[in-house]
Amino acid sequence: MKAKSWMAGVAAAATLFAAMTAPASAMAEESGAPGAAQSSASCTATSKTITVKGKDADAFKTWSDKTPLGNRTFKVAKVADYKIGNGASGGSLHLETVRESKAAILQAVKDLPTNTGQPLYEGEENDGDPMNWLANTQNDILIRKYADKPGVTGSTLESNSVSVDDTSNTMTLTMPGPGLYVIFDATTPKQQIKDTGDKTIAYDGFNNMLVGTSLPDGCNVSNNNGVVDLTSDLNAKTTSTTTNRGGFKFTKVGVGSNKAGLAGAEFTVYSDEHFTQVLHDAMGEEVKATSSENGGLVDFRNFKLNDGTYYLKETKVPNGYWSGSAAKLKVTMKNVQGTIQLESITDMSIPVSGLLSNGTNGYAYRNIKSITQLPLTGAMGMAILGVVAVLCIGGASIIIVRARKTKRSFAA
């Protein structure tokens, strides 16, 4: 395949400059083919900056809980220079693969996967400069594959060459010089989590970016401003996952006049099944609640819990109620579309007390005033029936024995 014109290559490369960033495995797509580059006496590349525009500037930072530690770390590798066909000024602009990494870049272009198994790029003799050839393909998928395995590793960009503007939600990278670069997100770990207490936002790291510094308007190349707009529907978006922490609720009821709701029961949440470590939520609050005067509501919804398993103990039983009916419950929370919600509450009593129920109005736990009020449907209630039955049988046996002894005494 013969090399295409340098001008067509510049046009494709300009699209590549603005589109080929891909955080969180996303990839940009252009709505139409770019215009061809034109010869110009004012096309001189001097800018060394690349700007990435997002929806949330915090995606460009590193975090410790809710405190920003600094900006992400990047490595950069220059893969092509901008060259003007007729000398220092004037003529058409094209890409020229950098000499120091040319062998590795050329091999990476040759290794680009194809459906046929045959290499698309055979070599400079037939296809010309490898990076200019790649730009000329105008194939976003092929360019993306090269960006994933570019044949170069890059060197760390100084921290003062990375700046973030919170007002405009942009990150500006200052390159060593004009040209086309592969930019690697070298942040460790790549996924950075901002934790505000009531929610977490997980910012995924950036995949390799293949993007160029800006070109003057005199170059007559589309998308030549060196800005990658991640907020555009046509380009890759910044990927983040927000999780809103949450809590749960249930109702405490009693017997007699307290069947509709029982006030004054205190509940404490623990992190272990042995009830030794009182839980503190993400805001540092001790997770405790008392059943309300109005309907016996036990409300943990204002606490900021993660998904997982928690252990709930009734640490204070209302006056007049049997301490043996105090609750020991296992609470499971799960993430439902980004919000932590209650999945289940189960009774930890052995045997199961039967005092926990789950109806149309949610979970309810009942206190009782004596053991005889245990529900007969519960395992403990059935056990009590069994004990009563044994006692009855024992009592009957004693009566029978005594009756026989009395009968014998009369007979004597």
Image: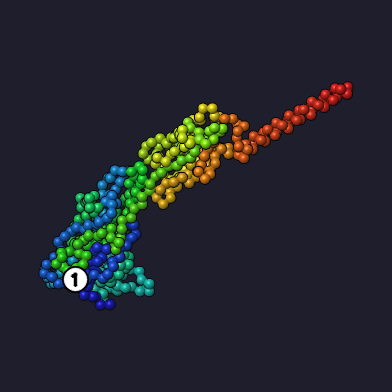
Residue at x-position 64% and y-position 36%: 383
- Which residue does the image show at 43% across and 50% down from the upper left? 336
Find residue 320 and report its horizontal and vertical position in percent: 54, 27
Residue 349: % across, % down: 56, 37
Q: Is residue 411 left or right of residue 325?
A: right
Q: How is the image coloured?
A: rainbow
Examine the rendered structure and indicate whether residue 285 appears above or below residue 78. Answer: above
Residue drawn at x 54%, y 39% as measured from the top left: 356
In this rendering, would 123 be left or right of 333?
left
Q: Which residue is mark 1?
A: 37
Residue shown at the point (36%, 39%) measured from the top left: 283
In the rendered image, the quadrant that contains the N terminus is bottom left
Q: Position of residue 290 (x, y in %)?
A: 45, 33
**Residue 344 shows in the view:** yes
What type is the residue that disc 1 sits on? Ala
Q: Is 110 located above or below residue 398 in the figure?
A: below
Foreground pick, 148 / 347? 347
Instruction: Say what secondary structure mark 1 lies in.
Output: loop
* Other-residue count near label 1 (Cα within 10 Å), few / some / many at <14 / 14–19 / ≥20: many
Q: Is residue 111 visible?
A: no
Rendering quarter of residue 52: bottom left
Along the line of sight, the residue nearer the viewer: 90 or 321: 321
Report the front residue among 353 and 368.
Answer: 368
Position of residue 300 relative to residue 336, above or below, is: above
Q: Quadrant of the C terminus?
A: top right
Left or right relative to 200: residue 227: left
